Image: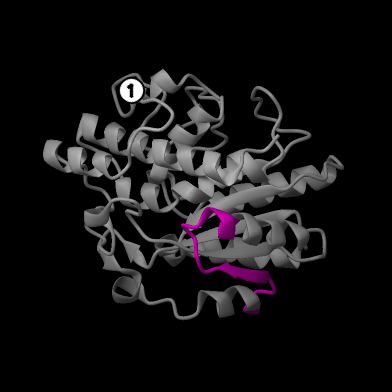
Amino acid sequence: MKPNTQQLSDLTIQVRRDILRMVHAVNSGHPGGSLGCTEFLVVLYQNLMERKEGFDMDGIGEDLFFLSNGHISPVFYSVLARSGYFPVSELATFRLINSRLQGHPTTHDHLPGIRMAAGSLGQGLSVAIGAAQAKKLNNDNHIVYALTGDGELQEGQNWEAIMYASAKKVDNLIATVDLNGKQIDGATDDVLAMGSIRAKFEAFDWDVLEIKEGNNIEAIIAGMNEAKSRTGKGKPVCVLLYTEMGNGVDYMMYSHAWHGKAPNDAQLENALAQNPETLGDY
C-alpha cells in the first residue's frame, strides 16, 4: 500500500534532517538543491515508481531512475536508504574515506540503488535514454525517469540527447528538470540565460508539462501521474518542476549561497529546529 500524504510529509522532513546532518558532519556537500528536490524524490520512490524488492543493475521488470545532477547526492542517498536499499545507519559515512556514499554517486562500490556515476553534469539524460531503449528491446513496459538541474541544461550533451529521444520516439522516458533558477555562481538567468526551457523542449518535439508547486507533495503526485499517462504515445515526456533551493530551511531559501555550503553548528541547530524529528535520526 502506498503511503498517505501525511506519511510522505513525515518522510520528507526526516530526509531534510538527514541532508543537513550529513553535510554538517563533514563540512562538505550540497544542501541547497538536495532540500529543493526532497519532496520530488520522496514521492518518486514512495508513490510513483514500480520497484522490485532488492536491487540489480539490469532493472528488468521495474521502473528505473537516473540522477544526472549528482551533486544532490545527500537527498538521493537518504531517500534510497529510507526506501530500503541499504541501512539508514550508513548515511553517517557520507563523504568519508572508503565510504560507499561519496560526494557524487559512483557505481564501483556497488551501493544498492545507484545505477550510474554522476560526477560530470550533462550525462544522465543520455544514460536514461539508453536504458529506456533497452527496455523497449526487452519488451519491458516500465518507465525510465531522469532528473536534471536547470543550470545543467547549459551543458550541450543534453541537447543532443533531447534531439535523439524525440527522433527515436523514446516514449517510455520522463525527464524532470529541477527549475529552481539558481546554480553555483548565481541565478541561471545571470550566468547563462536559457530563455523558455518549455519552448526549447517543445521545439525538439517533446511532450512538456509543468508542476508549478514543485515542493508540494500532492501537486507532485498529480503532475507526475499526468506525465505517466502521457508515456507510450510516441514522444518523450518532460516535466518542468518549479522548486525552491534550500526548501524547508528559511535562511537557505531564495539564495544560491547554499548550493554547496554546509551549515555550522548554530545553523544546523536552527535548521533542525525547523524540521523536527519524525522517523528517527540515523
Label 1, residues with CA under 10 Å away: few <14, some 14-19, many ≥20: some
Extreme residue in the right direction:
139
Q: Quadrant of the N terminus?
A: top right
Can you tell which quarter of the image residue 21 is in?
A: top left
Residue 205 lies left or right of residue 44; in this view the side is right
Q: Which residues are magenta?
A: 203-220
Residue 233 lies left or right of residue 223; in this view the side is right
From this viewpoint, is residue 170 visible? no
* Amino acid on which the number 1 mark rests in the picture: Ala
From this viewpoint, is residue 198 visible? yes
Residue at image point 64% right, 77% down:
202
The tally of labels here is 1
Q: Quadrant of the C terminus?
A: top left
Is 106 drawn above or below residue 192 in the view shown?
A: above
Residue at image point 73% right, 56% down:
228
Residue 23: percent from the left, percent from the top?
Answer: 27, 36
Residue 28 within the segment the image draws in magenta: no
Residue at image point 42% right, 23% down:
100
Is 165 drawn above or below residue 143 in the view shown?
A: below
Residue 275 lies left or right of residue 106; in this view the side is left
Residue 74: percent from the left, percent from the top?
Answer: 38, 38
Q: Which residue is mark 1?
A: 92
Extreme residue in the front direction:
6
Residue 108: percent from the left, percent from the top?
Answer: 49, 25
Residue 191: percent from the left, percent from the top?
Answer: 30, 71
Residue at image point 64% right, 43% down:
47
Check disc 1 and report its element: helix, strand or loop. Answer: helix
Q: Nearer the viewer, residue 92 or 267?
A: 267
Can you tell which quarter of the image residue 173 is in?
A: bottom right
Residue 59 lies left or right of residue 210; in this view the side is right
Q: Nearer the viewer, residue 251 or 153?
A: 251
